[in-house]
Amino acid sequence: MKLYIATGNEHKKKEFMQILQGIHCVLPKDEGISFDPEETGSSFLENALIKAKALFSEVKQPVIADDSGICIDALGGMPGVYSARYGDKAGKILNAEEKNMLVLQQMTGKQERSCRFVCCIVLMLSSDRIYTVQETCEGIVADKPFGEGGFGYDPIVYLPTFQKTVAELSEEEKNRFSHRGKAGAKIAALLKML
Ligand code: IMP
C-alpha cells in the first residue's frame, strides 16, 4: 500500500517508515509536489487536519499527516503548536539547537519541569473517511542538552523510565516509547484492520 505523508521533514519520514513497516511511505517532495500549507490551527488536531486535507486534495490517495510538538507545563503549554517555529522572528529562524537553548533559558530556576511530546496523526482515506489518533510521551525538561540521536527537542527531554534523554535512545527505543511511535502503531493497526 502507498501512503503519502504530509510533511517535508525527513526525520519524520524515517520514523514513520520504521513505525509503518510494510507500507510504502512517500513524501510530497519525492514526487515533485510542493507542500507547505499554513498551520493556522490552535490545536495539534486542527493542524494535522489542515495538512491531511491539503495533501489529499492534491493526490486524491490515502494520506497521513501528523502535527506534533512539545508542551511544557511551566511555560503554560508552550511551545505547543508553535514548536517548529518557536522563537523565530522576521529575518531570523532559529535552528533546533538555538530553540533548545531558548527553552532552557526560559526554564532557568523552574522547579516544575514536566513536559510532554504530543503527536496527532490524521489518516485520510477519502474526503469522508478520516481517522485520528493523538498520543503523548511524558518527560522532564533536562538542565542541559544530551545525546546525538533524534531531532528537534529530543536532547532536552529526559525520560525517567530510561534515565536518558530522547536523543540518547536507540531508534527502536524511541519508536516504541515516543508520541509518534505510539500514535503510529495505532494507525498501523487500523490500516491492517481496514
Ligand atoms: P510540525 O512539523 O509542524 O509537526 O512541527 C513539529 C515540531 O515539533 C518539530 O519541528 C520539532 O521541533 C518538534 N517535534 C515534534 N516531534 C518531535 C520529536 O519526536 N522529537 C523532537 N522534537 C519534535
Image (spheres, helix red, strand yellow):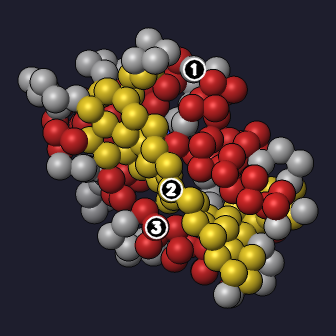
| Pointer 3 residue | 45
Q: Which element carries disc 1, helix, strand or loop? A: loop
Question: Residue 115, position in %: x, y?
Answer: 31, 37
Judge by depth and name the residue closer to the eye, 10 or 65: 65
Point out the tag, 1 or 2, that comes first from the N-terminus. Answer: 2
Residue at horizontal 74 percent and vertical 83 percent from the top:
126
**Mark 1 sits on what residue?**
169
Marks 3 and 1 in Cβ contact (< 8 Å): no
Residue under the image location 69 percent in, 81 percent down: 129
Name the residue: 77% across, 48% down: 20
Task: Check contact, mark 3 vs mark 2: CB within 8 A.
Answer: yes
Query: Which amino acid is tagged 2?
Result: Gln
- The quarter of the image holding the N terminus is bottom right
Mark 1 to mark 2 CA distance (whole Å): 22 Å
Q: Position of residue 190 (x, y in %)?
A: 74, 59
> Which numbered disc, 3 or 1, marks the residue that appears first in the sequence?
3
Measuring 64% from the left and 76% from the top, which residue is drawn there?
Answer: 130
Q: Which residue is mark 2?
A: 134
What is the total number of numbered labels drawn onto the structure image? 3
